[in-house]
Image: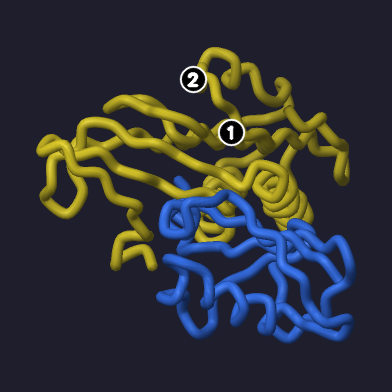
Amino acid sequence: MSPAVDAGGARVIGRMSEDPIRLDDLLGAGSSADGAVTVFVGRVRDQNRGRPVVRLHYEAYGKMAERELAAILEETVGRWTLSHLEAVHRTGTLELGELSVAIVVAAPHRATAYEASRHVIEEIKRRLPIWKREEYADGEVEWVGPAPSEA
Amino acid sequence: MTVTILLFANHRELANAASVELELSADANVREAVDRLRSLPGLACLPAEPTVAVNREYASLERDLNPGDEIALIPAVAGG
């Protein structure tokens, strides 16, 4: 786990995790000064482009992924006024419904929290060096790129 | 000079190796390293302009290399 760092007063935590993401551990973000806390989670979906998926595996370039995630978060707290920004991305094997990513933002107001959260997930999808191998119901496996609508 | 190239996901499976060491001329850049990779079994299909990182940061194919650099081929990422 990368250490929390202070950047402009915000508490910033980014980490890649081989262990399941536990939302309870994330929900204490911020303080009573924060009127808004957003939680975005990505979950393993049961199909991709109509093909039934049974589980998936994330392979990361671990050291670069930690660095890139930290850079995304630092850019984000530089652009919006936040008190807490935390992002966790899973690696390893995930079953259907498991959380693949979680982003928690605490801020004085909801607009900044929503915007910052959206920015972080879009940058993760664009930049984080991590790859997804899907395992299908028919037993085949395939490395998949971003969906056409997200590319 | 000797450099290490890390391979991930489908590249790693195509080459049947997670990393490759290459001996390059002293003035080599990333593009020359990638071109050399194409001569390895399984990697002839690398795109003309693959995304790469040098020492854990995204880098241009024209970037000059130094001995000991850690180069990584970055297939299309799929996080989230």
Q: Give me the residue at 54% from left, 36% from top.
A: A89
The colour of chain A is yellow
* Horizontal and vertical percent position of residue B30: 71, 78
What label does residue A20 carry, if any?
2
Disc 1: which residue:
A88
Q: Name which residue lies at 80% across and 83% down.
A: B28
Total numbered circles: 2
The answer to whether residue A131 shows anywhere in this view is yes
Q: Do the residues labelled 2 and 1 touch (CB within 8 Å)?
A: no
Chain appearing in blue on the rendered image = B
Relative to B36, residue A144 above or below: above
A136 sits to left or right of B35: left
- The spot of residue A15 in percent (x, y) is 66, 34
Residue at the top extreme of this rendering: A24
The answer to which image quadrant residue A13 occupies is top right
Residue A80 visible to the viewer = no
Residue at the (67%, 61%) spot, across then down: B5
SS class of the residue under badge 2?
Answer: loop
Whether residue A140 sits left or right of residue A74 in the image: it is left
Same chain for the residues under marks 2 and 1 in the image: yes
Determine the image quadrant of residue B20.
Answer: bottom right
Give, as a three-letter code, the residue at label 1: Val
Q: Looking at the picture, tell me which residue is in the foreground, A127 or A82.
A: A127
Vertical arrangement, residue A77 with respect to residue B33, above or below: above
Mark 2, Cα crowd under 10 Å, few <14 / some 14-19 / many 20+, is some
Front residue of this view, candidates A28 and B2: B2
Q: Distance between the residues labelled 2 and 1?
A: 10 Å
